[in-house]
Every structure is written in structure tokens, then in C-alpha cells.
């Protein structure tokens, strides 16, 4: 099946209110262009340099989401154009995004990354760390970032009960944080969870944004 066919198949499976981030990292411009021609506008990248090169050469109405682990020294390169940063996993990172966004005279949408998986390789605040950071309140002074919700990844396992339980934990945390700190916010509404292998479970648990790559573009070629 073509990329366009794969994309349409995934989109038919998404209920209203759930948006698709097509994960295009390590895929060439031609693959993104095919998805673009089929109507997709939100693409996810995990390397700042690669995303910036694609931004410069592809249509300007593409909404670029950064979904990788972010290094402080790379933030300034994507701030002029990035639509949303999914992986804010420390307060220091939030401060740096705010600082660079102020220089570019932009307000940048951010998601707080929560670590719920049972793998050490995943990044993120623990639920307690996230609540402590929000309770401290210093983030309210950061006028060039906009907190739009949470992001998280379930464990990479075949145990569907474990995946369900991790997604439900994320959803409960999202509801608690929204009620406690963002009850009056119209922006804090995104729960980004679910990838090619588990997005159906993520949607059932309350996801508003799924990050799907290989199911649309096929397996990645890391040698490019």
C-alpha cells in the first residue's frame, strides 16, 4: 500500500477529537510530500537539524512537532518555526524554551513529558515531580511558553494490561493537573500518547493526539 493509502487507513481509525502526528523522522522529503498531498499537515521529528532542513525545503503550512529528547543547545534553531514541543522533561528545558522564544518574539506550545513506562531509557518527569514543579508556580512567569498538556510513552511490551494501566495512569494525571492548575485554560487540552503499535489502546484511555510513523511510512532507514 502507498503512504497515502496507509495514512487514510490510520485516519479512518481515529475518533473525532483525536489528531494525528505523522512521525516522519528519518524519512525523506518525498515521503512527507506524499502524505502532505494526501492532506496530512502535522509531522513529528526527533532531531532538530533534520527537522530544520525539512522545514526549509517543504511547504510552509506544515505544522512541525518536535517529539524527540531535546538538548538545550539545539532549542534556538527550531524556535522560529516549531508548532509544538512534546518532550519537555525538566523545568530547566522549559526555561530555555521560554528564553529562546522571547528572543524570537513567539509563544511556543509545550507538552510536559511524563515517565510512566517501566524502562529506564525513557525520559520524563515522574507524576510527583511534575506536580511539585507545577505547585512551585515559577512556570507562571514564563510568558513565552504555553503549556498545552502532557505526553507519555507506555512500556515497550506485549503485555496489553500493563500498557492499558500506564495509559490510564497518564490520563488520570492529566485530569488531575487540568483540574488543579489549568481549570480556566482553553489551551491545556492535549494528551499525546500512543504510537504505531499501541495507539488504539491510547485512544481508549483518553489520548487526544497519536504519534504514528511506521504504520504510515513503513520501517525507517537509519542509514540515510
Image (spheres, rainbow, N blue to C red):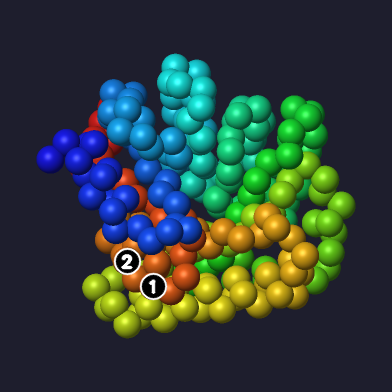
What is the quadrant of the N terminus in the image? top left
What's the residue at 38%, 37% (across, down)? 40
What is the quadrant of the C terminus in the image? top left
> For the residue carrying disc 1, how many other residues have a C-alpha within 10 Å: few (<14), some (14-19), or many (20+)?
few
Is the residue 176 above or below the residue 11 in the image?
Answer: below
As drawn, is 14 to the left or to the right of 96? left
Is the residue 17 above or below the residue 30 in the image?
Answer: below
Percent across and percent down for residue 24 are 36, 37
Percent across and percent down for residue 48 are 51, 33
Percent across and percent down for residue 106 are 74, 33
Which residue is label 2 attached to? 200
Q: Secondary structure at mark 2?
A: helix
Q: Residue furthest top?
A: 57
Rendering quarter of residue 193: bottom left
Which residue is label 1 attached to? 204
What's the residue at 47%, 78% (across, down)? 168
Q: Secondary structure at mark 1?
A: helix
What's the residue at 56%, 78% (across, down)? 172
Q: Is residue 34 visible?
A: yes
Q: Is residue 118 visible?
A: no
As drawn, is 150 to the left or to the right of 201? right
Checking the image for residue 21, the label placed there is none
Circles 2, 1 touching at the beta carbon (< 8 Å): yes
Mark 2 vs mark 1, CA separation in Å: 6 Å
Is the residue 106 above or below the residue 15 in the image?
Answer: above
Between 18 and 156, the residue placed more toward the observer is: 18
As drawn, is 2 to the left or to the right of 55? left
Amino acid at each position: 500500500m502507498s503512504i497515502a493509502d496507509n495514512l487514510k487507513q490510520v485516519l479512518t481509525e481515529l475518533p473525532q477529537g483525536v489528531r494525528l502526528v505523522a512521525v516522519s523522522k528519518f524519512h525523506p522529503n518525498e515521503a512527507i510530500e506524499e502524505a502532505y498531498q494526501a492532506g496530512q499537515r502535522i509531522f513529528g521529528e526527533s532531531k532538530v537539524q533534520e527537522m530544520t532542513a525539512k522545514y526549509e525545503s517543504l511547504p510552509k503550512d506544515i505544522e512541525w512537532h518536535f517529539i524527540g529528547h531535546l538538548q538545550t543547545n539545539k532549542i534556538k534553531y527550531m524556535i522560529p518555526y516549531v508548532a509544538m514541543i512534546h518532550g519537555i522533561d525538566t523545568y530547566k528545558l522549559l526555561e530555555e524554551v521560554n528564553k529562546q522564544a522571547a528572543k524570537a518574539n513567539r509563544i511556543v506550545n509545550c507538552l510536559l513529558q511524563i515517565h510512566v513506562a517501566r524502562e529506564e531509557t525513557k525520559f520524563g518527569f515522574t507524576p510527583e515531580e511534575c506536580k511539585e514543579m507545577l505547585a512551585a508556580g515559577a512556570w507562571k512567569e514564563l510568558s513565552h511558553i504555553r503549556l498545552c498538556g502532557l505526553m507519555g510513552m507506555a512500556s515497550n511490551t506485549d503485555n496489553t494490561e500493563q500498557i492499558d494501566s500506564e495509559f490510564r495512569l497518564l490520563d488520570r494525571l492529566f485530569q488531575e493537573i487540568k483540574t488543579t492548575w489549568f481549570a480556566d485554560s482553553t489551551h491545556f487540552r492535549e494528551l499525546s500518547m500512543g504510537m504505531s503499535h499501541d495507539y488504539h489502546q491510547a485512544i481508549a484511555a483518553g489520548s487526544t493526539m497519536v504519534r504514528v510513523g511506521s504504520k504510515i511510512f513503513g520501517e525507517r532507514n537509519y542509514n540515510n
